Image (cartoon, rainbow, N blue to C red):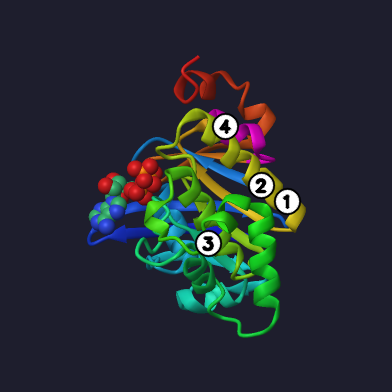
Amino acid sequence: MLSVNQLRSSYGRIEVLHGVSLDISAGEIVVVIGANGAGKTTLLHCLSGVQPIQDGNIIFRGESFNTVPAYRRVKHGLAQVPEGRQIFTSLSVEENLRLGAYLYTDDKVDRDMEDAFNMFPILREKRNLPAGGLSGGQQQMLAIARALLSRPSCLLLDEPSMGLAPILVAQIFDVVKNLKSLDVTVLLVEQNAFGALSIADRGYVMETGHITLSGEAQALIVDPRIRSAYLGL
Ligand code: ATP
């Protein structure tokens, strides 16, 4: 589904991704864990096309994405749920969702909206209210639902658990796990290593712009290096 080879990216003259490679097969949930500032968000921005790359390759479903602009990547089925949700606070919940479907004008948009409301009933209840009034967990649900309205085959999720109470974190991870049943492939970046590895098939560890470890999620979760560095054990 997605293949990233030797990706390099910089802010000005400061390189922050130093040759990152990873692969994601269709139907997988793959997580990139790493500390603050490791380069996880930059990686997702490179994949979605909002951050330029200096070197390397991004291949999505067999096609080079290196020079494809961000809006076209969405059309090809790659959607990003940004860090901090980035919902449109003054618009209603429904308007936020409809913006996710901006590529489409067909009748299926209404059906997709119904699917989103069935998946997140609280959003149906609040569909006419300003999205800025939602709780953090509800805003995260809205951000995920909005991305699903673009009919992605692969979703890039940036720190969906950030700033949420533990019970909501568990709910959000459940939502991510259930994306599999919608045939959506997931690349998740997270600082919550335990929660993310618990629902993932495979994982990568990113440290200061390098991938330093990778493997099956269940193997990583018991790896002593991960346990001491990321799980506080
Ligand atoms: P976090 O969990 O804090 O979001 P991260 O792993 O996602 O961390 P990035 O946000 O990708 O890491 O940041 C990687 C490095 O790039 C950090 O050193 C950060 O300070 C730097 N950086 C990020 N965005 C910019 C920017 N717009 N301009 C300059 N430097 C940036």
Q: Nearer the viewer, residue 148 or 124?
A: 124
Q: CA distance from mark 2 to mark 3?
A: 29 Å
Amino acid marked by disc 1: Lys
- Determine which quarter of the picture holds residue 34: top left
Sequence-first tag of 1 and 4: 1
Sequence-first tag of 4 and 2: 2
Res 61 seen here: no
Count of numbered circles in the view: 4
Contact flag, marks 3 and 1 (Cβ < 8 Å): no
Amino acid marked by disc 4: Gly
Residue of label 4: 195
Q: Nearer the viewer, residue 115 or 78?
A: 115
Residue of label 2: 29
Sequence-first tag of 2 and 1: 2
Residue of label 3: 127
Q: CA distance from mark 2 to mark 1?
A: 8 Å
| Mark 2 Cα-neighbour bin, 10 Å: few <14, some 14–19, many ≥20 | many
Sequence-first tag of 2 and 3: 2
| Mark 3 Cα-neighbour bin, 10 Å: few <14, some 14–19, many ≥20 | some
What stretch of residues is rendered in magenta?
Answer: 194-202
Q: CA distance from mark 1 to mark 4?
A: 17 Å
Q: Secondary structure at mark 2?
A: strand
Contact flag, marks 1 and 4 (Cβ < 8 Å): no
| Mark 1 Cα-neighbour bin, 10 Å: few <14, some 14–19, many ≥20 | some
Res 168 seen here: yes
Q: Nearer the viewer, mark 4 or mark 2?
A: 4
Q: Which mark is residue 180?
A: 1
